[in-house]
Image (cartoon, rainbow, N blue to C red):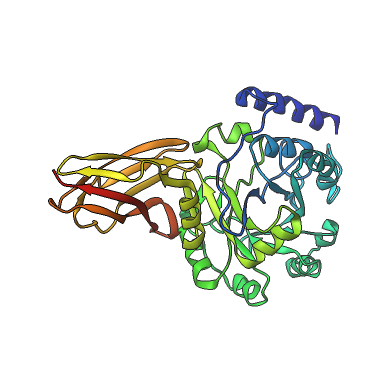
Amino acid sequence: MNKCYFLSVALLVLQLNVNAQPNTRRVINIPDIPGYLTLKCDFHMHTVFSDGNVWPSIRVAEAWQEGLDAIAITDHIEYHPHKDDLPVQFGRAYEIAKPHADNMGLLLIKAAEITRKMPPGHFNCLFLEDVAALDQEDFWASMSAAVDQGAYIFWNHPGWRQKDEIPIWYDEHDSIYDLGWMHGMEIVNGSSYYPLAYQWCLEKGIPILGNSDVHNPTGLDFPSGSEGTRSLTLVFARETNNDSVQEALLAGRTAVWRGNELYGQPAFLKAIFDESVRVISQPVILKGKNASYVQVINESDITFKLTMGERLEGFSYATEMVLYPGRTAILRLSNLIQGKEGKSDISIPFSVTNLFTGPDVHLSVTLDMQVNLISQ
């Protein structure tokens, strides 16, 4: 045990050196949406109590430092490569991490991972009461033990061990789905994205999740900066507590953040965009043929990559625009209809090419502003 502990400490020191500011917490600027808080969550990670390389309390420290709101340590039920150095103790990682999470104001969910060959693959079980009850030789008995505790169960990395990481839906998954035991599915696991799994979720009404599945210190696997942020599930919850998180997950109020890409229902993604982006130079004065430079601010940590939707008649403007996190961009706007005067509200259509409401389906948005046309 001491060997594992000191190895974890050494790795933590290395991680903190990578991140450079160990005693500060990053604020992830993804806005709340009307009616809900936007909680930043990672529901898939491992410690030395299965095949991870850090002590449980380190997972809490990392999550706090990186600006997360809720985590689940999901050590494997069946796989314990450190068992010669660390006795198998189901739920022990949660017991160690919980006091630290409470002190740091971080939600910690009691969880575990059922780990079987494909099919059926791996399933995370959240909101458990007794982790040891899942230690069953038969897969279905293990799943049933989680269901009996009211667990939230989701299918991990559905492309795991499949050719080109393309998921396959087996008969076993039909059975799990038909029993009502597939409450969610990872469409993102670490850096892997599964478009086909996303399509299944849309067709079958399965909530989407995205998690890190981190085994090493996060500073080793995910460099600092927005592009290197670990993959997260955004949960739109009424309150910051485990009951609210579970209710939101069951209701399907989730989105997935991976690098600078967002995946989710149109209403949720549009709400994030609308709460993040606004035109700050209003009204826009357009004098004759002269162009006006419209200032558009992005107050989130998400880069929004805009490309022209259906062109708005009567105006000239750029066909592409990138709104970088925490910055103000310029949109050059000209009036093509001369002689017209007065104030009016306009909405310029764009497609956000890094926000996905389905595989290869981008979110449609508008930049709304008031213009004042003055002839010369």
Rendered location of residue 135, percent (x, y): 82, 59
- Look at the picture and state if 48 lies above or below 275: above
Rendered location of residue 252, percent (x, y): 60, 65
Q: Measuring 74% from the left and 51% from the top, which residue is drawn there?
A: 76
- Residue 194 visible, this angle: no
Which sits in the foreground, 85 or 76?
Answer: 76
| Left or right of residue 347: residue 340 | left
- Residue 328 visible, this angle: yes
Q: Measuring 68% from the left and 46% from the top, which residue is drawn there?
A: 69
Which sits in the foreground, 308 or 337?
Answer: 337
Rendered location of residue 98, percent (x, y): 82, 44
Q: Measuring 81% from the left and 39% from the top, which residue is drawn there?
A: 103
| Left or right of residue 25: residue 350 | left
- Look at the picture and state if 20 lies above or below 146: above
| Left or right of residue 221: residue 339 | left
- Look at the picture and state if 217 lies above or below 145: above
Residue 294 occupies which quadrant of the picture?
top left
- Look at the picture and state if 42 lies above or below 311: above
Q: How many marks?
A: 0
Which sits in the foreground, 124 or 269?
Answer: 269
Quarter the C terminus occupies: top left
Rendered location of residue 349, percent (x, y): 31, 56
Residue 23 occupies which quadrant of the picture?
top right
Q: Measuring 25% from the left and 47% from the top, which residue is drawn there?
A: 319
| Left or right of residue 180: residue 29 | left
Quarter the N terminus occupies: top right
Given the current orientation, which residue lies at the most extreme bottom position? 178
